[in-house]
Image (cartoon, coloured by chain):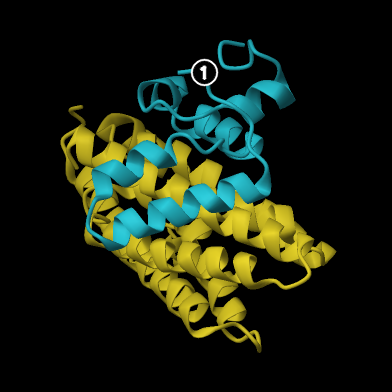
Amino acid sequence: MKSMEKNGLLISIVQSVYLIDFGRKKLASEVSNSEGRIALMRGLSTALDVFNEVHDNASNDLEMVILAEHAFITEELRYSVEPMVASSLSAALASFDDALRVLVTVQNPTAYQNAETSWPRHRKYRHHNMPKDAFHIAAASHITRLRNTLRTPGINNTERQVYAQRVKNMSAAQNAYLALQKKALSCGGQD
Amino acid sequence: MEHKIMTMDEKFAMFQKIWALEDAGQKEEAQKFWMQIPMPAYLAKWCKEKVGVDFLLHNGFNLAEANEEYGKEWLTH
């Protein structure tokens, strides 16, 4: 993704997060709830556009997929009241930090080939024969988390669409990451 | 331009202007108003840590809430 497009998408991610955040704060603070609801719905609608755009660029910008999730989870964590949910969201943030680290390593064939030698060959530790590393672990856990959220009663249609799109984004990201792994491990050790 | 802190009502009034511009297809104009709304402090901190200080400075975000919460030197420390 070109630098200006990337900057534009990052701005959209940040702005949709803060619109959702504003909507939640307003809902919590006012009697009538109408302004908070308007802001929240507008934020969710913007978020859907953002996640659609992230999906369209997933194959060439995996960092953006992770950053989008990281930003939204950071906001969700601030409003989670149940300890188990908060714990799950905190774990998601930590695992996405790990995913960002390995995303750097996989783009260095020598480094990734060395890292791969530490990975058991048993299929339990593999994803389509590639190491089931921090990226795959983060993505798979988050897909489960998002699907569990989709089963929550009472979420509105737009929220449902946003979560469904995020599931698609994580799946697309895993496929794109698998391609990076294969590329790194098939290179002759040159950077 | 000196960015200022806003009340929730002021922010909502600004958002209403932004939405009217966006719905009319005037996205660039809408962005100018967006940059006037203070970003929540935690989100500004997230941007600094995950995207970088340049992202915050070059795009002209209103960091008044972050400056108040973290101190004026927070971006460079």
Question: Is residue A178 visible from the viewing direction of this image?
Answer: no
Chain A: give its colour.
yellow
**Residue A46 vs residue A183: left or right?**
right
Question: Could you tell me which residue is drawn at 65 percent across and 84 percent down?
Answer: A152
Amino acid at the residue labelled 1: Glu
- Which residue is nearer to you in this view: B64 or A55? B64
Q: Residue at x 65, y 30 (%)?
A: B65
Residue A97 x, y percent position in the rendering: 54, 42
- Residue A79, quarter of the rendered image: bottom right
**Is the C terminus of chain A in the top left, top right, bottom left or bottom right quadrant?**
top left
Q: Give the image location of residue A35, x and y in percent.
A: 61, 66
Vertical placement of residue B72 versus B63, above or below: above
Image colour assigned to chain B: cyan
Q: Chain of mark 1?
A: B
B23 up-or-down from A108: above or below: below
* Foreground pick, A167 / B24: B24
> What x and y, as percent, mark residue A13?
42, 49
Q: Quadrant of the N terminus of chain A?
A: top left
Q: Position of residue A164 (x, y in %)?
A: 43, 77
Q: Residues within 10 Å of mark 1 (few under 14, many from 20)?
A: few
Q: State the residue position of label 1.
A: B2
Q: Secondary structure at mark 1?
A: loop
Q: Nearer the viewer, residue A61 or A78?
A: A78
Is residue A27 or residue A113 the one in the foreground?
A27
Give me the residue at 55% from left, 83% from top.
A156
Left or right of A77 on screen, residue A4: left
- Identify the image quadrant of residue A112: top left
